[in-house]
Amino acid sequence: MSAPDLVVQDVAAGYGARKVLRGLSLPPVPGAQVTALVGPNGAGKTTLLRAIAGLVPASGTIRFGTQDLLTASAQQRAGVMAFMPQFMPQRMSLSVLEAVISALRASPPSTATWSNDGFRDASLAVLARLGIVDLALSAFDQLSGGQRQLASLAQALVRRPKLLLLDEPTSALDLRHQLQVMQIVREVAAQGTTVIAVLHDLQAAARWADNVVVMKDGALYASGAASDAITSTMLREVYGLDGIVERTSTGELHIGGYALKA
Ligand SMILES: Nc1ncnc2c1ncn2[C@@H]1O[C@H](COP(=O)(O)OP(=O)(O)OP(=O)(O)O)[C@@H](O)[C@H]1O
């Protein structure tokens, strides 16, 4: 069965009196694909992910297939999705392996019967997939920023979510790990997970995402294939930048030559 689309319609969300999203509607976010969420600082990208994850009060419609995520219980949501936040907790007195096992125990996929060894093996397998099995016994709160980001991604992936929300998943990673993580994100989508990833690197969004959603001031500015959503007009109107967007001879989108708008 193919993964369902995510429907976001007329969503309002914010923080107390501060309304960040005011009636945001997106075209259906396609199932089993990677959708990049881009836009300038403060555009509301994290707020949208938090609204989908049930972490800020929201109204409107947020539906994943037939499941209404706005009325779902925390347990129901945890059974469907995983959210990797932009900032990891500073204090966590667990080893990396314990942290991943505890994320898995909190919401184990129902596709298996779980034993203690099963939790441990599945967690070690994800650490191995991310190339950080050597960190398994390290204290989570003594990791470097990039290591912490990989460990946090392991906590999200280990639950094999149907909907994976990633907030700047590669912002602290070196080039090799950026590549590795984005390849894994694509594999996860190919295996049936619907992925939404906030990315600041437009070149990475063009390379890795099936669809790009551009947000500005809490609203949708554009969405579609990278070549439709990422344009020089968008750079000017959304980021206040002059830039060049062109197709290379191999058909890839190249975005560069940025300069502050004159
Ligand atoms: N906890 C909060 N309380 C009040 N306002 C908040 C809170 N978190 C975010 N905001 C405000 O909401 C707006 C949108 O923030 P959000 O984090 O969603 O943006 P973003 O697009 O993810 O930005 P960035 O790219 O900088 O991470 C900003 O103006 C921000 O100041």
Image (tube, rainbow, N blue to C red):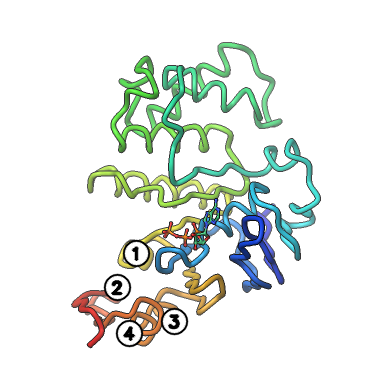
What amino acid is labelled 1 in the image?
A: Arg
Depth-wise, is mark 2 or mark 4 nearer the camera? 4
Residues at badges 3 and 4 in contact (C-beta under 8 Å)?
no
Residue at 41 percent across and 31 percent down: it is 151
Please give the residue where the numbered disc 2 appears in the rendered image. Answer: 252
Please give the residue where the numbered disc 1 appears in the rendered image. Answer: 207
Q: Which mark is residue 232?
A: 4
Residues at badges 2 and 4 in contact (C-beta under 8 Å)?
no
What amino acid is labelled 4 in the image?
A: Ser
- Calculate the distance from the C-alpha at mark 2 to the C-alpha at mark 4: 16 Å
Of the residues under marks 2 and 3, which one precedes in the sequence? 3
In the image: residue 188, left or right of residue 168: right
What amino acid is labelled 3 in the image?
A: Asp
Residues at badges 2 and 1 in contact (C-beta under 8 Å)?
yes
Measured as percent of width and height from the top left, residue 153 is found at 45, 38
Measured as percent of width and height from the top left, residue 74 is found at 73, 39
What amino acid is labelled 2 in the image?
A: Glu
User: In this picture, is 234 found above or below 195?
Assistant: below
